Image: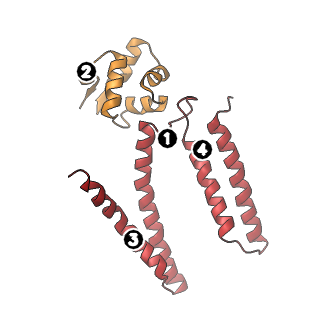
Chain colours: A red, B orange
Amino acid sequence: MKMTTRKWGAALFGAGTAIAAGFTVYKWLTGQSVGFSELTSTAILLGSFLSAITWGSREEGDGPAEDEELGRHITMKSAKISYFILTGLLLAALVVEKWAFGRENMALIVVTCFSMIVLPLTEWIVSRQYR
Amino acid sequence: MENKIKQLRKLKGISQEELARVCGVSRQTINAIENNKYDPSLKLAFQLARALGVTVDELFHA
């Protein structure tokens, strides 16, 4: 099996993600505090792994390239789906915060409201270019 | 939009990889267009038509 850049990237980021996630779980199980650095490093590595298994290169012919037509189509479709997932997660976080902990997180409320405005606002701004 | 890329490509005896190389895209792009997963840009439609020796009109139909 030929190891392309995509496969090397996937293997490296996959191993990195497993190590970071394992370390985070180990800290949590042993009662140590799990915070910003553990969670963000795991998320960044997982994001890089997913990116590595998605994109190939034209030269190596191992998948759609990010900068070609199909790549742009995939990116645009994924961006809108991601936006709705993210808005849904923010709303869920608001509900959990209110009903489970009985408090209102003003920063979370502001970000959730902004998430509801940002898509139509951006569409309006972009549509101005085509008047 | 329906297209005749697969039939014309097979008629000419060229693979998806070869057509992809001529048009400067990946094999997956050719495969996605052949299976009507997405409509190519006008630029790529012209490149495909030129590579297969037909007009865009002959290659695509609504």
Give the number of the disc on residue B58: 2
How far is mark 2 from mark 1, CA to CA?
30 Å
Q: Does A67 appear above or below B15?
A: below
Image quarter of the N terminus of chain B: top left
Give the number of the disc on residue B15: none
Same subunit, labels 2 and 1: the answer reads no
How far is mark 4 from mark 1, CA to CA?
11 Å
Q: Foreground residue, B42 or A62?
A: B42
Quarter of the image where one finds residue B20: top left
Same subunit, labels 3 and 4: the answer reads yes
Same subunit, labels 2 and 4: the answer reads no
Q: Which of marks 3 and 4 is nearer the N terminus?
A: 4
| One can see residue B15 in this view | yes
Give the number of the disc on residue A66: 1
At label 3, the amino acid type is: Phe
Residue visible at 77% across and 75% down in the picture: A31
Q: Earlier in the sequence, mark 3 or mark 1?
A: 1
Residue visible at 41% across and 61% down in the picture: A84
Residue named by callout 4: A52
- Closer to the observer: label 2 or label 4? 4
Query: Mark 3: which secondary structure?
Result: helix
Residue named by callout 3: A114
